[in-house]
Image (tube, rainbow, N blue to C red):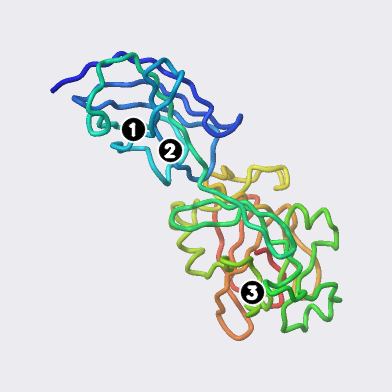
Amino acid sequence: MKIRFTFFFLLFSAVSFAQSIEVKDVKQQGNSLQVFYNFSGGSGLYTVSLHYSLDNGSTWLGPARAVSGDVGKGIKPGSNKSILWNVLADREHLKGEALRFKVTAKSESGTVKDIDGNVYHSVQIGTQLWMKENLKTSKYRNGARIPTGLSDRQWKSSKSGAYAVYDNNSANNANYGKLYNWYAVADARGLCPIGWHVPSDAEWTALENFLGGAGVAGGKLKAVSTLWRSLNEGATNESGFSALPGGYRSLNGNYNNIGFNGYWWSSTETSTGNAWYRYLDYDSGNSGRDFTNKQIGFSV
C-alpha cells in the first residue's frame, strides 16, 4: 500500500524566545514520512516530540508514537536533524490531507530546593542529573547549622565541616554559592538536599567521558557568562551545566582566583588528609582533575 501527502511546514518556537525549532522539509519514504528540522539556541538535553495537524494547525494531534531518529529523550540541539514517522503504524487511515507539522522540545530539567529554601535548576546530562548552580545551603539536611565565620587559623586547623563566602561578600554568595571544606562534603548529616549527593570522582569522570573526554569537556561545562574572565576559552555550555568561576579559599584562609577558575569537590578521598576535585580554567577548554587538602574551600 502506498500513500501520498501534501505538506505544509510550520516554524514553531519550541522552548523559549532564545530557542526555536524550524521544520525545514518533509519527504515521503514509502509509507513513512521523514521530517527534517533545525533546533537552535538551546543547551543541555531535551525530550523531542513530533505533532501533526489535519486542519491547517487549528488542532494538533500526537505526539506521533511510531517514530525514530532525533526524537524522544536525550536529544541535543543542532542542525540537520530528522524524525522518521511510520504513519500507518499510528494511523490506519490517512487520506492525503494537507498536513502541518511541528516539532516540540521539553528541557530535561527541573528544580530542587535545599533546607534554606534556595532553589536550584537541574539538567540531564547523559544518564546523570546535575544541579546547574553551586550549592548555597548554610545547614545540613537535618537542619543543623554548618559552622562559618572561621578565622584563617581556625579554617586551617578545622577537621569538621565549615563553609565560607568568597571575601565575605554576599554578592559572591548569590553568584557563585558557598565554598565548603571537604569535611562538610563528607558529613553524615548530608550537605545536599534529599535525594541528591556530592558526586564521586568516578561520577565526574563519567560526566567528562559523556562530553567527549576531559580534553574538551571543560568548554561544554562552562557558562557563557561575563562572570568568567575575558577569553573563556572554548566555552559553549553545550551540556547546560552552566559552570561559573567561584574561586576557592586556601588552606591559609586566603581567597583566590574568582573569575579565573571554578573548583568542585568530589566525595572521594585519596588519603586521610586529601580528596579529589575538578577544576575549570578561563583560558582552557579542558576539565582538570587533582587532589588537595580537605581543609580547602571549594564549590559543590
- Asked whether the residues under the numbered discs 3 and 1 touch, taking CB atoms below 8 Å apart as contact, a structural biologist would say no
Residue 300 placement (x, y as % from top left) = 65, 64
Check disc 1 and report its element: helix, strand or loop: strand
Classify residue 224 as left or right of residue 63: right
The total number of labels drawn is 3
170 in relation to 65, above or below: below
| Farthest-out residue, left | 1
Q: Residue furthest bottom?
A: 272
Q: Is residue 11 left or right of residue 53?
A: right
First along the sequence among labels 3 and 2: 2
Q: Nearer the viewer, residue 195 or 126?
A: 195
The numbered mark at residue 268 is: none
Amino acid at circle 3: Gly
**Residue 190: which numbered mark, if any?**
3
12 or 225: nearer the viewer: 12
The quadrant in which residue 52 appears is top left
3 or 1: tag closer to the N-terminus? 1
The residue that disc 1 covers is 83
The local secondary structure at tag 2 comes to: strand
According to the image, label 2 marks what residue?
48
CB atoms at circles 1 and 2 under 8 Å apart?
Answer: yes
